[in-house]
Image: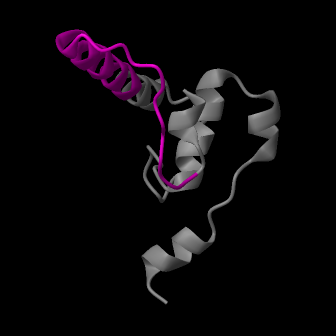
Amino acid sequence: MNEWKSLWNRRTVDASVLKDGSPEEILLELKRANGFDITSSRTPPQRTNLIGWFGFYEQFLQTKYELGANAKQRNLPIKSVFEVGCGSGANLYL
C-alpha cells in the first residue's frame, strides 16, 4: 500500500476536541480529520495553530462576501446556501 493510502486510512477525529474544544480547535480538528493538516505529516498536528485557523476562516469570509456581493448585483436576496460535499463538515461548522 502506498504511503498516502496508509495515512488516509488512519485518519480519525478526536471526539474530546469536538466536545470540549474552542471553535478554533474544533475547526482545525475537522479539517485535520478530512486530511487538510496544516502541519507537516512528520510532526504532530498543533491544535492551536492560529495561522491555519485564520487561513480557513479567511476562506470562509471570502466565500460569504462573494455570495453576498453576487446577490446584491443581481438584486436577488439569498434565502439559503447548501454545502454539498463530503468530509467532516468543517465548512458547514463555520
Direction from residue 41 to residue 33 in the image, left or right: right
* Picture layout, residue 60 above or below residue 6: above
Tell me residue 89's x, y (percent). 58, 43
For residue 20, what is the image quadrant?
top right
Residue at (48% x, 59% y) in the render: 42
Task: Tell which of 59 and 14 is nearer to you.
Answer: 59
Residue at (17% x, 12% y) in the render: 73
Quarter placement of the C terminus: top right
Task: Tell which of 14 and 79 is nearer to you.
Answer: 79
Direction from residue 43 to residue 74 in the image, left or right: left
The coloring applied to the image is: one colour
Residue 32 falls within the magenta-colored stretch: no
Direction from residue 39 to residue 7 in the image, left or right: right
Task: Tell me, yes or no, if residue 4 can be seen here.
Answer: yes
Tell me residue 52's x, y (percent). 43, 32
Task: Tell which of 74 and 88 is nearer to you.
Answer: 74
Residue 73 falls within the magenta-colored stretch: yes
